[in-house]
Image (cartoon, coloured by chain):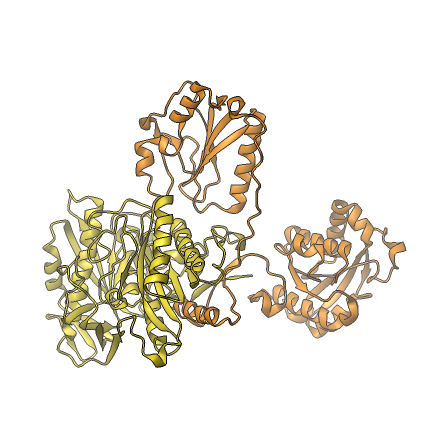
Amino acid sequence: MAAETLRVVCYLNQFFGQLGGEDKAGVGPQVVDGAIGAARAVQQALGDAGTVVATVICGDNYAAEQAERATTELVALVAAARPDLLVAGPAFLAGRYGVACGALCAAAQAELKIPTVTGMHAENPGVELYRRQVYVVQTGAEATRMLPEVQRLVALGLKLARGEAIGAPAAHGYFARGVTRNIVAGANAADRAVAMLLDKLAGRAFTTEVPRPAFPPVAAPRLVKTLAGATIALVTDGGLVPRGNPDGIEALNATRYGAYSIEGKSSLDAAQYDNPHRGYDTTWVKQDPHRLVPVDVARELEQSGAIGKLHETIYSTVGVATTLAQSARMGREIAEKLRAAGVDAVILTST
Amino acid sequence: MRLELRWSDVDEVTAAPATRLVGTRLEVDLAELRELLSADSRLARIRLELARPGERCRIGRVFDVIAPRAKAEGGEDFPGVLGKVARAGHGRTSALDGVAVVATDQQTDNVGTLAVIDMAGPNAALSAFGRTHNLVIAAWPSPSTERSDYLAAVRLAALKTAVHLARTAREADPDRVDVFALSPSPRVPPELAHLPRVAYVFQIHSHQRPTGLDEGILYGDPVRRMLPTIVHPNEVLDGAVLRGFMGRSVTTWAIQNHPMIRALYAQHARTLWFAGVVVTVAQATEPERVRSAFLTAGLVAHTLGADGAVLTKIGGGAPHVDMAQAAAQCEALGVKTTAVVEDMSTDGSAEGMLLFDFPGVDALVNVGSSQEPITLPAMDRVIGADDLASKLLGETRATYGGLCGAIEQVGATRVMAEVR
């Protein structure tokens, strides 16, 4: 496809689409041929590189209050115009508008398989909601400098439409999508590390190459009973499984966990267990599974009355190179099952 | 301590009736070399092949890569493993530039240890070993040889070969001489006393898997439960440290040409004072990790008197956290740190890049994601992996971690992960 025939559809809210102000915020999706309102700036920025074939407009309240329906209707209008690229907004600091832009871009990418780009201010809630899926170009808070802002959206959009490689967020002015990509740096890692250390020692500014992780803190809940009245479960990410690994728990990057009964067992027989974990030396756990899952001691505590009851199911997975998303899902599922079973507290053993 | 690395440039390697260096052409008597290596009864069959840069050839089943080095004066070759135990890092060592010895592992398909080298195409440029003339050793175990013995035998064969080749340069006038000399650490000349003192914390092994008795790593010792200790950087450059058998994104080659030690030498007495090297291992249990971390920081801060430290790791996730714990202990003692990490994410998300968040450990350099896919284009021949040849000949998918030399955790490489 030649660049000059590139078909572009723009998405605007009622204000930028010149339908009216807050009084028109309830209007539903509609389409206008060619460029209207702020879409004219998109056409200007495109120059000869493409044509705005249609402008799709929707009121902010309609988009916010019936979000799913609005997105479905808008995707259908966009699809009818057969675009090569969707440019949504820019929405600046307008929250409802920003969220609608992000939702439409994400849906159009997924359903119509076309590239999309939008633009927002850093504090627009649409940024946090959609930057992982959609290229969101950073703009100012207000539409005082419409053309230069739109030019940056269009520049990135054209690269996407042409299938060109997209550089770093800073190079194109978009919000980091939170994905990593290998590139070749100008110097080797050792030289970069020594240079960074010299900067740090001298008190000069330096830029770390790895962002600090934003692990959400999870506060430990208080046990509201005495231990003597509580049911305690044993859970591990150290990889203990019955021999034969019946659930096929992966040796690393696990997506599965197992629930194994210890009913009637006062201890674990090493011959009946195995360990696929590839992140640590499992020799000692295979020799004696209690080093990881202390069923023996827990039974003694149960017998002596120090704890009310030992839960009769142990949960186990392999915690090595496991993604945060999978860890969170498995943890949530295990916690739900434990709560449904009336478990009061968990001893979680890791390696 | 003063070490001279006496480099001879090589731009051609050929099979020949005698092993010798003729100008920049290295001639190798492959039959003689094979006979030398066959003396090891742990090996049943040995095949030697040559691969040159630009040739459409893929080397499969790569286990480790060794730089050709031979002591010309003072010390032993690979002491404790090949030569007898003696201090390394002084005297003269002959080195061949442009040649590498590639050891292959014919026994396992474990991607944690095995990788490929492309001699042509886009991936050749990502690895040092796509630009060297490579002598590739394929050796098979004799029937009764166990896994660890086999790997020890393969590595020994590669070390013998590295010495055998570099000995051809002992009588030659070197093309270049690198001199590595540090005055004893406490005696900083007054005019350089203002320079920040910088130490290097080098994690040389990980105990995530059982370590073989014969898995010589530091002067032939398998460093089981080793506590942090101080070595002279020259010892690392001169064969005292070899990579263990679990070689994820680390080669012995990179250790012999250690990029961090070279970078610190390059700045020594100019912008910093190179205070020394602390070698550590990634431990297996929490008490060992904690003990190792504060002992490391103590050596860095109190014994070496360092103002700053750079740290690198080996292996995977547990060593990554081990290193960070040592860095955090350094920071707690007022020593500023920079650490070299891999992108640990397994799904390409930035939130999974790092497995720790310790106060002060805020200056991180990364060597890229070993999990990111990479395409291996079709080649004309495959060596070192007969059994995988049909799979490795055509275009195939791999990862950066599966391309030997694309990512070196000690910092020799330029690949890095960028957050997009």
Q: Quadrant of the C terminus of chain A?
A: top left
Whether A244 is drawn above or below B152: the answer is above
Q: Is residue B124 visible?
A: no
Q: Is residue B112 left or right of residue A65?
A: left
Residue at x 43%, y 44% (from the top left corner): A320
Looking at the image, the residue that sits furthest to the right is: A23
Pick the residue in front: A173 or A211: A211
Q: Quadrant of the N terminus of chain A?
A: bottom right
Q: Is residue A74 left or right of residue B262?
A: right
Whether A149 is drawn above or below A177: the answer is below
- Per the rendering, the colour in which chain B appears is yellow
Pick the residue in front: B224 or A211: B224
- Per the rendering, the colour in which chain A appears is orange
Q: Is residue A200 visible?
A: yes
Count of marks placed on residues: 0
Q: Is residue B136 left or right of residue A339?
A: left
Q: Quadrant of residue B280?
A: bottom left
Residue at x 51%, y 42% (from the top left corner): A327
- Where is residue B288 drawn, in percent x and y? 34, 46
Q: Is residue B305 left or right of residue A224?
A: left
- Where is residue B393 drawn, in percent x and y? 34, 57
Q: Quadrant of residue A92?
A: bottom right
- Where is residue B99 drawn, in percent x and y? 24, 70
- Where is residue A79 drawn, in percent x and y? 72, 54
Residue at x 79%, y 65% (from the top left corner): A34
Pick the residue in front: B44 or B88: B88
Whether A77 is drawn above or below B171: the answer is above
Pick the residue in front: A102 or B17: A102
